[in-house]
Image (tube, rainbow, N blue to C red):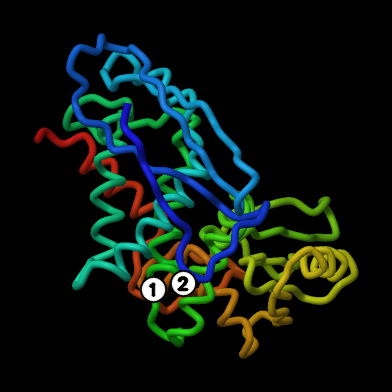
Amino acid sequence: MQEWGFELPTGNISDRSMIKYTDFLLATASGKAVGERFPGKLATPFEKTKLSAYALAAMVESVVVSEELMQAFDQETAAVVVATLTYYKMEMEESFDATRWIDINLIRLCSKFGDYRKDDPSSFSLKPSLSLFPQFMFNLRRSQFVQVFNYSPDETAYFRMMLNRKSITNATVMIQPSLISYSFNFLPSTTLLGVASISADRILLLDSYFSAFAQLLQAPHDDVELIICERFPVPRLVVCDQHGSQARFLLAKLNPSATYNNEVATAGMDVIFIDDVNLQVFFEHLQRLDVQTS
């Protein structure tokens, strides 16, 4: 048995909504059979009298247990862990290239657990438990946790602190905002986080956790009030009209599926003036890198 010890960062106080995780780096276990489990225990003391103990069991890594690993894979939790590790490395390692680090690890993960034929990108597919993870990584690369330009050091520190203190559900919204569509013909529903969702007959509510954007008809207004009431500190509310000055805050969070250098825009859709690749191009490039012969 081996004993691990860790402490919360100075000035941090644990509460019921705070995210806690432990990263185990497993070396080759001599004498362990393939698929065999090894025991472990995680203890979290509270002050001097309270102690919570958790029994853990993990399997020795092998190709045989890959299916079992994928069945238990929680892509939302994994996205939050990657976001936390990314900003930690940005703070601790000089000249750390966060975007490149995310890309390399995403390629390794998808290459190991994806289904494909060598050198055939069209054959590439991911299991349902992993299918949304590339999308989370795409939005993490563009998020305030990685792209610190245009944010003050205080704002960046605040964003990172809140990522550590909120539930997985809320932390996932910080990484990949939620976009809800309202129209006169359909019930409110979650829609694609992209420019293609902008239409003249739609009202959009974007929840990026730290800010909420909406045009104030009654339904989105009521939902905005619910979001604001549940959060502390209270998020910033931005009301914007299409082509208005405040619309830039909404467009900055959307997938740039229609830009000035392509022709996919339709009537009523906004065009983003940006050189970044969109989610489709990002995923196609990921497929090519995953299936190529090493």
Relative height, residue 225 to residue 291 (above, below): below
Q: Is disc 1 surrounded by few (<14), some (14 to 19) or many (20+) residues within 10 Å?
A: some
Q: Position of residue 98 (x, y in %)?
A: 29, 64
Which residue lies under the disc numbered 1?
147
The residue positioned 30% from the left and 20% from the top of the image is: 60
Q: Is disc 2 surrounded by few (<14), some (14 to 19) or many (20+) residues within 10 Å?
A: some
Q: Position of residue 123 (x, y in %)?
A: 30, 28
Instruction: Please tell me which residue lies in front, 3 or 250.
Output: 3
Element on which disc 1 rests: loop
Element on which disc 2 rests: loop
Q: Position of residue 172 (x, y in %)?
A: 56, 54
Extreme residue toward the top, this view:
33
Q: Position of residue 58 (x, y in %)?
A: 40, 23
Relative height, residue 58 to residue 151 (above, below): above
The residue positioned 30% from the left and 33% from the top of the image is: 122
- Position of 65 compared to 237: left or right? left
Identified by mark 2, the residue type is Gln
Image marks 1 and 2: residues in contact by CB distance under 8 Å:
yes
The residue positioned 52% from the left and 68% from the top of the image is: 161
Extreme residue toward the left, this view:
294
Instruction: Please tell me which residue lies in front, 273 or 156.
Output: 156
Extreme residue toward the bottom, this view:
245
- Distance between the alpha carbons at the discs numbered 1 and 2: 5 Å
Which residue lies under the disc numbered 2?
144
Identified by mark 1, the residue type is Gln
- Quarter in which the C terminus is drawn: top left
Relative height, residue 197 to residue 251 (above, below): above
Residue 212: quarter of image:
bottom right
Disc on res. 87: none
